Image (cartoon, rainbow, N blue to C red):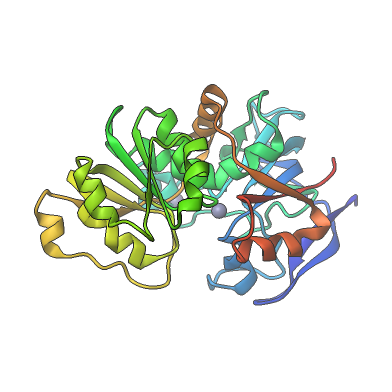
Amino acid sequence: MPKMRAVQVAQKGGLLESVERERPQPGFGEVRVKVQACGVCHSDCIAKDGLFPTVPYPIIPGHEVAGVIEAVGEGVVGWPIGTRVGVGWFGGHCGRCEPCRRGDMIACTNLRIPGINCDGGYAEAMVSPADALVRIPDDLSSEDAAPLLCAGVTTYNALRGSGARPGDLVAVLGIGGLGHLGVQFAAKMGFRTVAIARGADKESLARQLGAHIYLDSAAQDVAAELTRLGGAKAILATVPNAQAMSEVIPGLAVRGVLIVIGVGAEPIQVSALDLISGSRSVKGHASGTAIDSEDTLNFSVLSGVRPTIETMPLERAAEAYDRMMRAEARFRMVLTMGQ
Ligand SMILES: [Zn+2]
Ligand SMILES: [Zn+2]
């Protein structure tokens, strides 16, 4: 059996350790991807720390995977060897549960999530169902494609589904791994884009990313400023901070929506009056399916949106993960396999 290098977590709370594994064989309907790059996402802590009870140990983390098909299983049509492909959070759906039968595959109750409930992309190769694959455009490198398959599709899909129209005021709360993409997508979609972060030093970055307006939450009453600007049709909340999210809700326009994609430990607080007056809403948004990711990559090429990344070789996965967890990555860490 041919071997591969991989990085795994042996048990709940274990370390990221380099190992040699057998190269997995694709089953019916599956392909094997030769991994070229894999993003390091905050959600990888679900695998490392066992935050879902279903994590099968030992597990190879990673759900921002970009590479090339190197083997094709039986029953696969239209995905030949050599095709550049990616796999994101959406790693395959069951087709049998109620959400699947209603065509809402990202809500599949048996969703396959690479690196969370099956082996992911911190490896030289991984197996994926063909129906979870994303075509990578020629003009996009694997390193740049990787973070777009989770952080990218999440922000892009949330914004395009927000109900905001070109010219509407749209705010992005936080300029980190998610937010630096959210600001770019919002500006390129034609929204009057507000970036919100803490500190005056973030303003030049926000403007480089395309923000038309910058609000410093450490120095300004953000909700009052948004209201003064006419109110936000949508606010994309990317920060892992419930209090910051709660504070911006009164800055929503009539029928405005706060879209929550950052995960904080505390509950978000909202006054009933703020929701009722102006018919505002607060909602969550989960990633996107394979075709949503493909739309994200194509739009990124069309509009020039790119993630800001730091790359590290696979062997330094533990270091890359720690850097991400300490919020020191500018802005996404990407592991490269050298192949
Ligand atoms: Zn992710
Ligand atoms: Zn399903």
Q: Is 220 displayed left or right of 3 in the figure?
A: left
* Residue appearing at x 45%, y 40% in the figure: 183
Q: Where is residue 184 in the image (x, y as percent from the top left)?
A: 48, 36
* Residue appearing at x 57%, y 38% in the figure: 131
Q: How many labels does the image show?
A: 0
Name which quarter of the figure residue 307 lies in. Answer: top right
**Where 114 sits versus 32, above or below?**
below
User: Quadrant location of the C terminus?
Assistant: top right
**Can residue 5 be spotted in the picture?**
yes
**Where 336 sits versus 77, above or below?**
below
* Residue appearing at x 17%, y 65% in the figure: 271
Q: Is 306 displayed left or right of 173 in the figure?
A: right
Q: Where is residue 296 in the image (x, y as percent from the top left)?
A: 51, 33
For the residue pair 152 and 248, the one nearer the viewer reads as: 248
For the residue pair 14 and 111, the one nearer the viewer reads as: 14
Q: Is 47 displayed left or right of 269 in the figure?
A: right
Q: Position of residue 245 (x, y in %)?
A: 33, 60
Q: Where is residue 299 in the image (x, y as percent from the top left)?
A: 50, 27
* Residue appearing at x 64%, y 42% in the figure: 146
